[in-house]
Amino acid sequence: MLIKRITVSTKNKIDMIEITKLVQEFVDESANHNGLVNVYVPHTTAGITINEAADPDVIYDMKFAFNRISPKLREYLHNEGNSNAHFLSSVIGCSITIPFEAKELLLGTWQGIFLCDFDGPRKRDVIISIS
């Protein structure tokens, strides 16, 4: 198994950063022509997802929806004040797996890979592995 760790800086409280090119570069650097790439974020207030990467309005709408479905509320018991970020991380999930063939990620035409930060701005680790 090949593993690479990258660091991605986010700029907003809730942010989505496209990392498709970084993942594709790691696949290109590997000796594997076919296989699986796993993208994992080791944080409890961040996530990894696949969504449309062609229209930036989709990301705007996603961030708007994240704020609507999980607002910051006083009633949360977790004393760090980021319970909504923990909830969103659990909803989105911390990893995805994508097959690749002939060194090309088998994503749909409009799909991209996104790091989601729900408690930024921060520097977030992303671990990419190939098998």
Image (cartoon, rainbow, N blue to C red):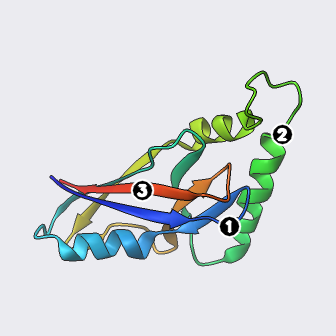
Q: CA distance from mark 3 to mark 2?
A: 25 Å
In the depicted view, which residue is nearer to us: 21 or 74?
74
Badge 2 local density, few (<14 within 10 Å), some, or many (20+)?
Answer: some
Q: Amino acid at mark 2?
A: Lys
Q: How many marks?
A: 3
Secondary element type, mark 1: loop
Q: Earlier in the sequence, mark 1 or mark 2?
A: 1
Residue occupying the far left of the picture: 31
Badge 1 local density, few (<14 within 10 Å), some, or many (20+)?
Answer: few
Q: Quadrant of residue 100?
A: bottom left
Q: Amino acid at mark 3?
A: Val
Q: Earlier in the sequence, mark 1 or mark 3?
A: 1
Q: Answer whether labels 1 and 3 touch (C-beta < 8 Å).
A: no
Residue occupying the far right of the picture: 74
Residue visible at 71% across and 56% down in the picture = 14
Q: Is 24 situated left or right of 110 in this image?
A: left
Badge 3 local density, few (<14 within 10 Å), some, or many (20+)?
Answer: many
Residue visible at 78% across and 52% down in the picture = 65
Residue visible at 42% across and 46% down in the picture = 95
Q: Position of residue 114 (x, y in %)?
A: 53, 62
Q: Answer whether labels 1 and 2 touch (C-beta < 8 Å).
A: no
Q: Is 82 situated above or below 63?
A: above
Q: Which residue is disc 2 drawn over?
A: 72
Q: CA distance from mark 1 to mark 3?
A: 16 Å
Q: Earlier in the sequence, mark 3 or mark 2?
A: 2
Q: Position of residue 90 (x, y in %)?
A: 58, 35
Q: Which residue is disc 1 drawn over?
A: 11
Q: Position of residue 47 (x, y in %)?
A: 54, 48
Q: Quadrant of residue 71?
A: top right
Q: Amino acid at mark 1?
A: Lys
Q: Which residue is disc 3 drawn over?
A: 126
In front: label 1 or label 2 = 1
